[in-house]
Image (cartoon, rainbow, N blue to C red):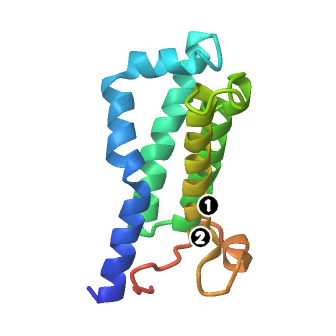
Amino acid sequence: MTTAALAALIVRYGLVLLFLPFSALDKIFGFDHAVRQAQQVVKPRPLAAGMILVGLFVEIVCTLGVVSGAADRACAFVIAGYCAVTALLYKPFWAQGDFWSDPDGKGRALLWDFLKNLSLGAGFLLIVVGVDGSGLAPFLAHPFASSHPYGVHP
């Protein structure tokens, strides 16, 4: 493995580290807790459980795609969307009522978490658009193709 390929592997695993293994295992071993947390957003338990299962799919399957390079652009696109959706659903800094009045309040803490989610999603979008100047064209032309992050071409 070349130095560039090793660096790409380390960076990609760094991007997904939050999801696999940590968040995925947290959902698996604390499924009831995760469902209760999801019920803060949607009340019906079956719908909340479905949201958690979708999250598990994204956190396991799509992160493996990003790390392995298999359909990595499509997987990174899904994870970027997942980061944005979870920011909007679970980090509603605007709804706390203390954002402007209390610098140590829940609103400010949630703002930082909200921005971290969006920033992580933006990191995944770099995989989608590439860093070689090719932009969205390769993704739009072949969304499930590999970007060949480790220099191995078929």
Residue 39 in which image quadrant: top right
- To which residue does mark 1 refer? 122
Res 2 → quadrant: bottom left
Count the labels in the image: 2
In this rendering, is residue 19 above or below 145? Answer: above
Residue 149 place in picture, x, y as percent:
45, 78
Residue 100: x and y, percent? 72, 32
Q: Three-letter amino acid code at disc 2?
A: Leu
Q: Is residue 16 left or right of residue 89?
A: left
Q: How far apart are labels 2 and 1 at the CA level?
A: 7 Å
Crowd class of label 1 (few under 14; some 14 to 19; many from 20; radius 10 Å): some
SS category of the residue bearing label 2: helix
Quadrant placement of the C terminus: bottom left
Amino acid found under the numbered disc labelled 1: Ala
The local crowd at label 2, few if under 14, some if 14 to 19, many if 20 or more residues have their Cα within 10 Å, is some
Task: Tell me what residue is drawn at x 61 percent, y 35 percent.
Answer: 108
| Foreground of the two, 100 or 93 | 100
Residue 47 picture location, percent across and down:
61, 18
Residue at 45%, 60% (x, y): give it. Answer: 65
Q: Residue at x 68, y 85 (%)?
A: 134
Indicate left or right for 36 with 12 as reference. right
Query: Based on the displayed image, in which of its 4 quarters is residue 138 positioned?
Result: bottom right
Instruction: Find residue 88 and name its label.
Output: none
- Would residue 66 appear left or right of 140 to someone viewing this image? left
Residue marked by disc 2: 126
